[in-house]
Image (spheres, helix red, strand yellow):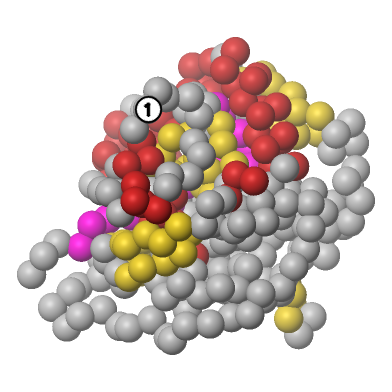
Amino acid sequence: MTGARAALLALAGSAAGAGLFAFTLARGGAAPPPPPADVTVPPGMAYVPGGTTRIGDERVADERPVFAARVRPFFMDAHLVTVAEFRRFVEATGHVTSAERAGDGGVYDAPTDSWRLVRGATWRRPLGPDAPPAPDDHPVTQVSWYDADAYAQWAGKRLPTEVEWEHAARGGRDARAPYAWGDSLASGGRHRANTWQGAPAANGREDGWTHTSPVGAFGRTSLGLTDMGGNVWQWTADWYRAYPDPERARAPRTAMNVGPPSEKALRGGSFLCRPDFCHGYRVSARSRATPETALFHTGFRLVQDVSPP
């Protein structure tokens, strides 16, 4: 699993460079329109209206240039794929994950501020064989991009593109708040996402969680989506690369997949992110990992195309 070793360092490094600052932006945009009368939203999914969204942030190197992207309507899973849902997939298909085949998965050790490949760390026990099993209602982790894609094919769905993910995080209406839920990480004394609090060596657990939390524990966005920031990073369909120029942004949604493969783009941030280090739960924040990499803070959600009437 040599690619995972490089990806662990790349992921931590890219997260560190994703934004060493905190900021507040004005919210904007009208409320998203309801689904058309002839559109039936699949169970467990939310309707994301089409529209034009400005993708990126000029203040962060790998989030610029900001470009406008036109997005067609689609459905998105209201919550991250859970451990219980992934178990049903494994039982139905006999799928063996990348971490299970390799024999290890990536785990961050906070006291030593280092990543380790832990023997026996899998989606069943993300921290390793001696740790407690992953709760059924938490997002599945220690799954590679290949595992997520296999699940998507079984479920009849697909992974979102980066543009689709950010469009949904911005409410399908080009909202300019830094987070999918608004302007701040907490309001009224209540945390809005599962993120890291306190010193680098120890999570202060002000939000109630050290690692993953149950999906949807921190509320919904205006579109009805949960965990669109924090909890776990989310695989996307796209290869990670510099953003295209504005003309390329108007190309088909697979345009950012053109070129030699290297690392897949991740969105959403995780319970490891904090504003002065990675700030990965901003709507425009990006990270990356090689597609065979499995990590204890990375999962996925899926999307589905809206069929024409």
Residue 41 image position (x, y, % from top left) = 25, 70
Residue 270 image position (x, y, % from top left) = 65, 51
The relative height of residue 103 versus residue 150 in the rendered view (above or below) is above
Number of marks in the image? 1
Q: Quadrant of the N terminus?
A: top right
Left or right of 243 in this view: 203: right
Magenta stretch: dominant SS?
loop
Left or right of 246 in this view: 298: right
Q: Quadrant of residue 77?
A: bottom left
The relative height of residue 60 versus residue 256 in the rendered view (above or below) is below
Residue at 40% x, 53% y is 246
Residue pointed to by mark 1: 259
The 10 Å Cα crowd at callout 1, few under 14, some 14 to 19, many 20 or more, is few
| Residue type (three-letter) at the residue carrying disc 1 | Gly
Residue 49 magenta-highlighted = no
Residue 106 visible? The answer is no
Residue 167 image position (x, y, % from top left) = 43, 63
Left or right of 211 in this view: 268: left
The relative height of residue 131 versus residue 23 in the rendered view (above or below) is above
Q: Residue furthest left?
A: 309
Q: Secondary structure at mark 1?
A: loop
Residue 147 visible? The answer is yes
The one of 218 and 269 positioned closer to us in this rendering:
269
Residue at 89% x, 56% y is 198
Residue at 42% x, 47% y is 245
Q: Quadrant of the C terminus?
A: bottom left
Residue at 58% x, 50% y is 63
Magenta segment boundaries in residue numbering? 293-306
Residue 299 magenta-highlighted = yes
Residue 108 image position (x, y, % from top left) = 75, 34
